[in-house]
């Protein structure tokens, strides 16, 4: 066996010594350096080697671990004149930076090594650690690691030796310290509020030992409360973790807030407490000694109160528990919002922090709600405010100085003032995202349904010719060969007016670059962001835009972005707009054009209407406006923008191009409106027919050409085909696909997961019309939820479910026999209340996220495990279509052939290169030349689904 590599270890403090000694015990040769001679003597006694300087320490060492207290000490250790480590680093050395530092610091250190000292061979990893001295000595630390993947792989043996939990954080050098920063924010707040609460309990005569034991059993507990309060109870300030550490760490947190222009209310209030304690002379004492600043006259009161007799203090204890729980919740939300601002996903933070020192029961409750977009359930903001108000009043009566609780209370007051009081506490995230927090009064105008013929009869006559407009737009596009229109589609239905255009379901830079090099004026990227929680949608859009920018630079291309949304106004409007602005800057103007002709989604006098037979219904009066996640009250788009975006846009920022401008004024009138737009404002486009959108697109291209304006777009599907001059095309039938395999005589597969009322009616009509020519399998979601109780997670349950195995087997047989198969999820909407009524005794907690994911994952599981390739696959509903494309058959790039019915696109993959590889989540067997029919949930009449299935039946 080859000897283990030599390790240099700089910084042999309380944790560093334990880490170095454990490496020695694990067989690594360790040479150490520390400014404390006693630490070097201890290392020598344990079998290590000692060096007199960092330069001497790192000689001949393949790995250099730096575990000093802060960034200043790190700089001195590496760059001090003649003695710095940089002067002795061996060839290809790997530096492992384990200190908690600002996220930008690791990059600065590496740049200095590379640029100033020309040591391009040296690599650096960002690996902050946590866990304390005992876990360090046992090799049981939690280590967050980030940096180049190949370098991380080389360093794995050393990192694993020192850790029990090793996480690799995506995002490059500095990403690990971003996660550590968020964790330290929470840890610092939790220690401080524990001190604040324990001091209050003692002041109010509560037995503090009994109170401590009460908190451990309930939702007010945190990791730090459990770990630090025993020090307070015993009045022991031996520095297991000194106050100076959190003076430093909270400064890192708030400095990052200043750098990012991001508000940190709770963290800033907490930092002031640690600073005050340090100025009081407690800097070197244990951080639990912070409790003394609340009890200046009786600093040992918490310990004395362990002997109090307090039989009548149950209500007081309950109120202080509420204080802890509420502060923990606000701190969790602030921390997650900061993480999102730093580009760390809520999912990543949730999985790591839930088991780390920053954990609390409140964090474990609120983080999954934010992740799932569930801002309504649980204890309301007003209820939390009222409980905390009782605590504030009680503290005032005893002249007790609540600091963090007071800041938390003011945030709750602000949320109630903004009208959020009735929402769940997860909705407090809006205080950091500015959503729906407009200071300008918003008046909602009520509109009534009107007959289609009556409203349209009052409009100016349409004089424009579609063919001429298309030709003019095509002339512009031919002159702009270096520019692409990139459509970020928040579900797969955005292609429903297009043909002969590509759709990507992945967005790595090389794939995007190949698309930039291809022919055509644009392409789609399926983001499926409508199915994501708000923060994840924001992060995803930013990631794609960054990759697009890199790919455009590689290929010498320019691009404009359409954030394609729903013509019924659902989707992450504000989050995606702000993500665009934060990532590539504000455009000259935003174009808001939700018109979608085939679906009768018209914009008239700035009001969005949805056609229902011969009637136009204002959007806010349709079921779409009642959407649990994306609901709204405004049909007027000026009001809708302000309802959804809050203070981001004022009424002065919003203008519109009217149908009179388009039909009477033409290009010149539209140009004038575009040029009058305030920087970064929103221009609403009214449209009733495709020609209206074509005329607007022509004027837009003229302004771009003459005035070099840059626009960004939030639109429905019809804008894309107009802007790219894609003409209408007759519906496509199987015989019109020249390469469709005539020998494939299997049945067609229809999967339906959409729960909108129109989808349910269409599925019922399909079953009735096709009768015995269709085999129907129903995935009973309630039964699967009960079955889920037996398994640790959804995917495990799906693999072992006898119900799904039976559906897969029988569906495969019917498809092989040439029979069309429908797999549909049960139609009753499942809620948490209904789940609890089915299985009230179960120990496993079902969440809204489980319910949302289960039906979709079940359909994907069935598609992936079929033993037969169907003749075609029809997916009913936006989310179902996305899952079918990206996970079921694992498409990477598809071609939109046309429409199987108005607004029902057909995708096509010609070769195996169009599919994901297995390591990307792809299938072993690629289903090439399989038509994928994307059937939106809200398109067509009751018989439209049956009509398409009949047209695609075996002849």
Image (tube, grey):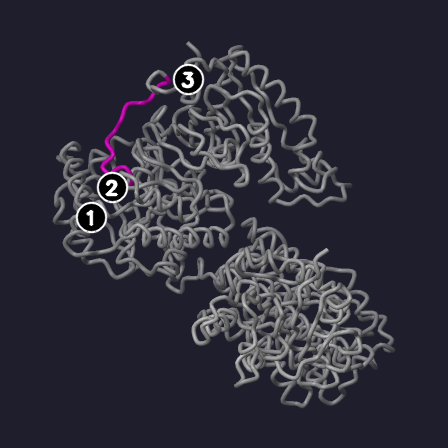
Query: Which residues make up the magenta segment?
Result: 720-734
Q: Which residue is mark 2?
A: 723
Asked if residue 927 is positioned above or below residue 389 in the image, the reply reads above
Asked if residue 116 is positioned above or below residue 332 in the image, the reply reads below
Residue drawn at x 76%, y 69% is 137
When asked about the image quadrant of residue 151, the answer is bottom right
Q: Is any atom of residue 226 visible in this view?
A: no
Please report whichever mark, 1 or 2, sits nearer to the chain's N-terminal start: 1
Q: Which residue is mark 3?
A: 741
Instruction: Identify the disc placed on residue 700.
Output: 1
**Few, some or many C-alpha atoms within 10 Å of disc 3 (few <14, some 14-19, many ≥20)?**
few
**Few, some or many C-alpha atoms within 10 Å of disc 2 (few <14, some 14-19, many ≥20)?**
many
Please report whichever mark, 2 or 3, sits nearer to the chain's N-terminal start: 2
Q: CA distance from mark 2 to mark 3?
A: 34 Å
Q: Quadrant of the N terminus?
A: bottom right
Residue drawn at x 64%, y 78% is 245
Q: Is residue 580 left or right of residue 630?
A: left
Front-most of 397 and 833?
833
Residue drawn at x 47%, y 42% is 626
SS class, disc 3: loop
Asked if residue 752 is positioned above or below residue 253 in the image, the reply reads above
Q: Is residue 153 left or right of residue 606?
A: right
Are the residues flagged by discs 1 and 3 in contact, CB closer than 8 Å?
no
Query: Which percent across, then down, holds residue 117?
Result: 46, 75
Q: Is residue 268 magenta?
A: no
Q: CA distance from mark 1 to mark 3?
A: 43 Å
Main SS of the magenta part reads loop
Query: Which percent across, then down, holds residue 620?
Result: 40, 43
Q: CA distance from mark 1 to mark 2?
A: 9 Å
């Amino acid at each position: 066996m080859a000897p283990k590599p030599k390790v240099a270890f700089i910084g042999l403090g309380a944790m560093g010594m334990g880490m170095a000694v454990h490496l020695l015990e694990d067989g690594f040769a360790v040479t150490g350096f520390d400014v404390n001679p006693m630490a070097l003597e201890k290392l020598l006694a344990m079998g290590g080697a000692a060096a007199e300087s960092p330069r001497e320490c790192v000689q001949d060492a393949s790995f250099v671990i730096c575990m000093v207290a802060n960034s200043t000490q790190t700089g001195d250790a590496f760059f001090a004149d003649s003695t710095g480590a940089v002067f002795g680093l061996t060839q290809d050395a790997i530096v492992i930076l384990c200190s908690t530092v600002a996220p930008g610091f690791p990059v600065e250190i590496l740049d200095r090594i590379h640029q100033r000292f020309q040591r391009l061979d040296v690599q650096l990893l960002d690996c902050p650690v946590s866990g304390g001295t005992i876990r360090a000595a046992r090799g049981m630390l939690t280590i967050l690691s980030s940096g180049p993947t190949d370098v991380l792989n080389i360093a794995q043996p050393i990192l694993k030796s020192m850790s029990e939990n090793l996480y690799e954080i995506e995002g490059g050098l500095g990403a690990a310290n971003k996660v550590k920063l968020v964790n330290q924010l929470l840890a610092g707040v939790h220690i401080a509020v524990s001190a604040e609460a324990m001091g209050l309990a003692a002041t109010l005569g509560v037995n503090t030992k009994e109170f401590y034991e009460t908190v451990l059993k309930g939702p007010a507990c945190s990791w730090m409360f459990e770990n630090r309060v025993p020090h307070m109870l015993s009045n022991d300030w031996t520095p297991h973790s000194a106050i100076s550490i959190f003076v430093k760490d909270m400064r890192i947190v708030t400095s990052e807030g200043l750098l990012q222009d991001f508000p940190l209310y709770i963290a800033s209030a907490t930092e002031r407490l640690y600073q005050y304690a340090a100025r009081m002379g407690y800097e070197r004492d244990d951080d639990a000694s912070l409790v003394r600043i609340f009890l200046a006259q009786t600093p040992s009161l918490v310990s004395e109160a362990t002997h109090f007799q307090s039989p009548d203090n149950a209500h007081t204890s309950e109120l202080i528990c509420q204080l802890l729980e509420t502060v923990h919740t606000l701190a969790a939300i602030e921390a997650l919002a900061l993480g999102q601002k730093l580009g760390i996903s809520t999912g990543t933070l949730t999985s790591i922090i839930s088991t780390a020192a920053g954990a609390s029961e409140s964090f474990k409750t609120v983080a999954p709600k934010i992740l799932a977009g569930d801002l309504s359930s649980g204890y309301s903001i007003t209820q939390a405010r009222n409980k905390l108000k009782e605590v504030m009043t009680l503290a005032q009566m005893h002249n007790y100085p609540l600091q963090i609780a007071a800041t938390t209370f003011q945030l709750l007051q602000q949320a109630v003032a903004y009208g959020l009081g009735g929402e769940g506490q997860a909705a407090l995230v809006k205080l950091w995202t500015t959503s729906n927090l407009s200071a300008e009064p918003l008046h909602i105008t009520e509109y009534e349904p009107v007959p289609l013929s009556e409203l349209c009869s009052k409009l100016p006559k349409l004089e424009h010719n579609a063919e001429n407009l298309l030709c003019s737009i095509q002339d512009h596009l031919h002159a702009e060969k270096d520019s692409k229109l990139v459509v970020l589609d928040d579900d797969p239905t955005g292609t429903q007016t297009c043909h002969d255009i590509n759709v990507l379901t992945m967005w790595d830079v090389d794939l995007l670059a190949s698309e930039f090099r291809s022919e055509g004026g644009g392409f789609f990227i399926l983001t499926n962001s409508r199915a994501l929680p708000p923060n994840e949608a924001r992060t995803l859009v930013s990631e794609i835009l960054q990759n697009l920018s890199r790919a455009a630079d590689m290929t010498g291309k320019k691009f404009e972005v359409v954030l394609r949304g729903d013509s019924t106004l659902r989707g992450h409007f504000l989050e995606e707009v702000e993500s665009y602005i934060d990532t590539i800057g504000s455009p000259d103007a935003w174009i808001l054009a939700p018109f979608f002709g085939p679906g009768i989604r018209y914009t008239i006098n700035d009001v969005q209407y949805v056609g229902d037979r011969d009637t136009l219904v204002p959007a806010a009066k349709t079921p779409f406006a009642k959407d649990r996640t994306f609901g709204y009250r405004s049909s007027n788009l000026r009001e809708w923008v302000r309802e959804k975006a809050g203070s981001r846009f004022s009424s002065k920022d919003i203008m519109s191009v009217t149908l009179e401008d388009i039909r009477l004024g033409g290009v010149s009138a539209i140009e004038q409106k575009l040029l009058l737009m305030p920087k970064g404002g929103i221009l609403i486009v009214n449209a009733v027919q495709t020609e209206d959108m074509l005329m607007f697109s022509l004027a837009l291209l003229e302004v771009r050409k003459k005035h070099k304006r840059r626009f960004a777009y939030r639109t429905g599907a019809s804008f894309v085909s107009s802007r790219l001059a894609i003409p209408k095309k007759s519906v496509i039938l199987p015989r019109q696909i020249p390469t469709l395999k005539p020998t494939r005589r299997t049945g067609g597969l229809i999967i339906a997961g959409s729960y909108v009322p129109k989808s349910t009616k269409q599925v019922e009509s399909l079953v009735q019309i096709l009768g015995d020519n269709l085999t129907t399998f129903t995935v009973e979601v309630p039964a699967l939820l009960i079955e889920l109780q037996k398994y640790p997670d959804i995917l495990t349950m799906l693999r072992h479910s006898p119900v799904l195995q039976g559906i897969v087997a029988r569906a495969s047989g019917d498809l092989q026999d040439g029979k069309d198969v429908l797999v549909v999820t049960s139609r009753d909407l499942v809620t948490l209340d209904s789940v609890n009524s089915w299985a009230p005794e179960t120990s496993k907690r079902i969440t809204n996220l489980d319910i949302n994911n289960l039906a979709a994952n079940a359909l994907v599981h069935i598609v992936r495990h079929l033993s037969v390739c169907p003749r075609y696959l029809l997916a009913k509903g936006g989310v179902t279509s996305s899952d079918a494309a990206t996970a079921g058959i694992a498409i990477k790039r598809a071609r939109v052939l046309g429409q199987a019915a108005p607004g029902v696109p057909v995708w096509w993959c010609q070769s195996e290169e169009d599919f994901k590889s297995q390591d990307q989540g792809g299938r072993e067997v690629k289903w090439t030349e399989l038509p994928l029919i994307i059937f939106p949930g809200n398109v067509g009449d009751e018989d439209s689904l049956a009509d398409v299935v009949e047209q695609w039946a075996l002849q």
